[in-house]
Amino acid sequence: MKNGKNLAELARVFLRLGTIGFGGPAAHIAMMQREVVEDRKWMTQQHFLDLVGATNLIPGPNSTEMAIHCGFHRAGWSGLLIAGISFILPATLITGVFAWIYAKYHTVPQLAAVLYGIKPAVIAIIAGAVFQLGRKGLKNWQLGLVGSVVIFMSLAGINEIAAILIGGVVGMIWLRFSFGGSKIQSWLLALLPLNSALFYSGAGNTANASAMQIFMVFLKIGAVLFGSGYVLIAYLDGEVVSKLGWLTKEQLLDAIAIGQFTPGPLLSTATFIGYQILGVWGALLATVGVFLPSFIFVAILNPLIPKLRQSEWASAFLDAVNISAVGLMAAVTLELGRAILLDWKALLIAVSSIAVTLRFKKVSSVWIVVAGAVAGVLLKTIERVIVN
């Protein structure tokens, strides 16, 4: 009976997060941290941070895998499925509706005023999570330096998985032997070209897609996709545009646009693309294919994380990876702020949201997002009235 209540609560929490989860993986993880750690006390801050760090080292969408981790921690195998599916479902349904509209009318709906307010509020949520997780992960000055270096690496354009691996390995060796390891870091930089091996060859050049082809292409993408949603764009362009010819570049850009202004994981873009290729069945197969590897990877990884903490070397590696993950989130916050906080209205929403996030920790991130959306609509309306 207790497990049934846990599953129902998991479904409610992650359906809600999947519905209001604008802003990409960093924002989603920030919202989960607030819900799972601060509000419901399902796990400690340290274990949540361990999960974030470990998730950055495996392929797949980080926020979706964090939802699956949280479900597995709370209610075992059933929780793994319920939390993951609940988080994915809203985004795929919303994206599916937009895919149908696009296929029929060849237009992309615009929600400019709502998104204008949501984006600064999301930045505030990410900043709050960076502060909370960073305070927990910053155990010594060496880790502080590792995190700072990862921030600069990320801002310099170094791939996320390479940055976090370098931070983890260099930090582990430094913490265990107490030396800077500049030669080791230089050696590790040589590993960066290995990431290019993730860009694989396609299945062949054809615009006539079968159901099995669609499933296998998106299964392959889900199984090898490291990094952010922007890396996904490169994968999709190379596979469904250049190699297979299923979409034009213009259609791919429209698909990415849909993914960016709908909530939940950006990989729901697969739903949109699958629908354009083979209708409802294409949408279903592409969605299942791209998300299935995440469930498998998390099921393998989750039980190992507490054991890693028992090893001095593995524990040092986790500490370094954790602070590296926080560094990546901080870099994302800076980049989003530079792109979004372009006028006083957006800045006002962001500063107000940060104040609420840090001062009133019990206020749900849902309400911060809703308040941001309302503020965006009001400010844009006032601006139009003044101009006219």
Image: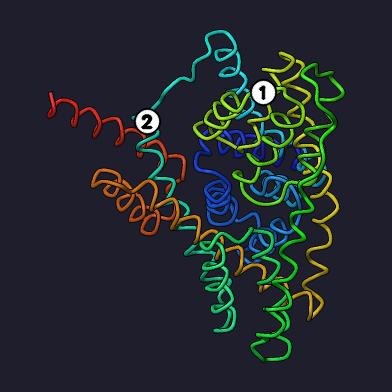
Q: CA distance from mark 1 to mark 2?
A: 29 Å
The residue at 79%/66% (across/down) is: 306
The vertical placement of 254 against 30, above or below, is above
Label 1 amino acid?
Leu
Q: 186 or 326, which lies in front?
A: 186
In contact (CB < 8 Å): disc 1 and disc 2: no
Quadrant containing the C terminus is top left
Say what secondary structure mark 2 lies in.
helix
Label 2 amino acid?
Val
The residue at 58%/17% (across/down) is: 97
Give the label on residue 267, or none: none
Q: 191 or 338, which lies in front?
A: 191
Q: 222 or 309, which lies in front?
A: 222
| Residue where numbered disc 1 is placed | 247
Tell me where residue 102 sits by quadrant: top right
| Residue where numbered disc 2 is placed | 114
Residue 64 on image: x %, y %: 67, 43
Tell me where residue 250 sits by quadrant: top right
The vertical placement of 39 against 171, above or below, is above
**Residue furthest toward the top?**
104
Which is nearer the N-term, disc 1 or disc 2? 2
Say what secondary structure mark 1 lies in.
loop
